Amino acid sequence: MEVHVVSKHDNSQHATFTLPDDTTLPELAESSIRIRTQIVSLTSNNLTYARMGFLARWWDTYPVADYYPTPYNNPADWGIAPARGHATVEESNIPDLVPGTVLQGFWPTSAALTDLKLEASLPAGHWVEISEHRQKLMPLYNRYVHVPESLENISRTQSLDSAEQEKIDRLAWPSVVLCRAGNHLNEYVFPVQPGTTTPIHPYGGKSGLRAMWTAADGDVTSAVMVSLGASTKTALGFAYFFNRRPKHSAPLGFLQVTSSVDQISTATEMANPVFPCKAVDYTDISSVETSKWLEERCPSKIVILDFGARSNALDKLLELIKNNDTLKSASEIIVQIGSQQKVYTPEESQASRQAMIDLGKVQYNTSGIEDTAIELLGLEKFFNKLLDSQLDMVNHRHECAPGLELIWGQGVAGPNGISSGWDRLCKGQAGPNEGLVYRVQPVDSA
């Protein structure tokens, strides 16, 4: 039973170890299940979970166990970076969650057995983790959803037939191209029905933030939208929904800055948006052509969505705006959504925090938006709408991200395992057309 752990002080340092199959586990607590992680994805978000693990309490999700080998049993130094995906119930004292049940959620990057304490929620099939050590974790990361599928063959067989491969591709896709963030930006932060739908602050509406995001902020009909890092997985999800907005809520234009211009242009053509769109390479941000295209839109507002663009991309864009007589009079909103695919040094993290202040950026928080939307809509309506959006994107996934290939790895350790994928993320080697996904459990060699 292999386990992957990450240094809390230097996230590029990580290790794997193997627990004996006969490891003694505590008795299953009341209202609990014991699971095995089956399928997970690795994206730049996983680096964020580690980098912000103390502040956002992501390290609390799956604490290292005291029976792990030294030094990996020291929670001050080592942690498990969780990942999105699917797991199977192996043991349970919850009648509705029998062994073999598949759950979607936030899992340990580990092949070992793991316990969760759950209570039923709404809609039917939703469960919330209620363990004491996870109470400071944001609600989004404590929610698990029953998936009416079987992973028995997937977890046991090396070679899958086409039907089984299609099944796991569909299951994995929403964990690679992140539907939730893109959907929430389009549906709640910049509502499709401006003037009739109350927009939600990008960080969520709690702590007095609700009044700080006005109807004017959420209205993009007089704005040019700019996506920086447009080929990141979160940006792809956003563009899928945003490009399909009706005319009455359309922006004046949508500029996508990316290292994969052909991919983004193809996705845009498939969407056939009712507003002008343009995709440019990072090297063309400051070009005369880009400046002219933006100027021709005559925006009164420029909304910049930074999904984790290269380090100088935002500076170049702001400089272009500053030096253009038409554009510099427009108001600016900068929403910080993602980070670059790399391990940040302490100095880089501090510089990033300072830039948030200096540029007046607005931090995006998926969980905060969900909390507020649930207050407004109720649990059932919110999650049913989200499920419809997710199914729509999965059913049209080749339009969402043409050319994106799911790269399936196997296990935790080894050249094709999670550990190798973590190395690639840390070094910025996971390409925009690659989705790193893993079958976590060992399988038969036949």
Image (cartoon, helix red, strand yellow):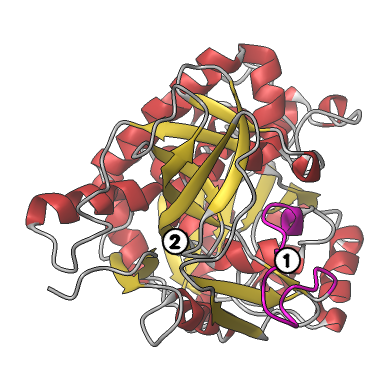
Kind of residue indicated by mark 1: Leu
126 relative to 378, above or below: below
Looking at the image, residue 280 lies above or below residue 154: below
- Whether 329 is drawn above or below 135: the answer is below
Q: Which residue type does callout 2 highlight?
A: Ser
Q: Is residue 259 visible?
A: yes
Crowdedness of circle 1 by 10 Å Cα count: few (<14), some, many (20+)?
some
Quadrant of the image occupied by residue 203? top right
Magenta segment boundaries in residue numbering: 58-76
Residue matched to label 2 = 41
Please identify the dominant SS of the magenta region.
loop
Residue 294 locus on image (x, y percent): 56, 56
Q: Is residue 275 visible?
A: no
Q: Quadrant of the C terminus?
A: bottom left
* Residue 356 lies within the magenta run: no
- Identify which residue, 125 or 258, lies in the foreground: 125
Left-right relation of 412 to 108? left
Which numbered circle lies on residue 318? 1
* Mark 1 residue element: helix
As drawn, the label of residue 387 is none
Which of the marked residues, 2 or 1, is nearer the chain's N terminus?
2
Judging depth in this view, the residue of 344 and 254 nearest the camera is: 344
Q: Is residue 300 left or right of residue 274?
A: right
Residue occupying image coordinates x 33% and y 73%: 409
Image point (50%, 62%), residue name: 112
- Crowding around mark 2 (Cα neighbors within 10 Å: few <14, some 14 to 19, many 20+) is many
> Could you tell me which residue is drawn at 66 percent across and 48 percent down?
303
Q: Nearer the viewer, residue 196 or 368?
A: 368
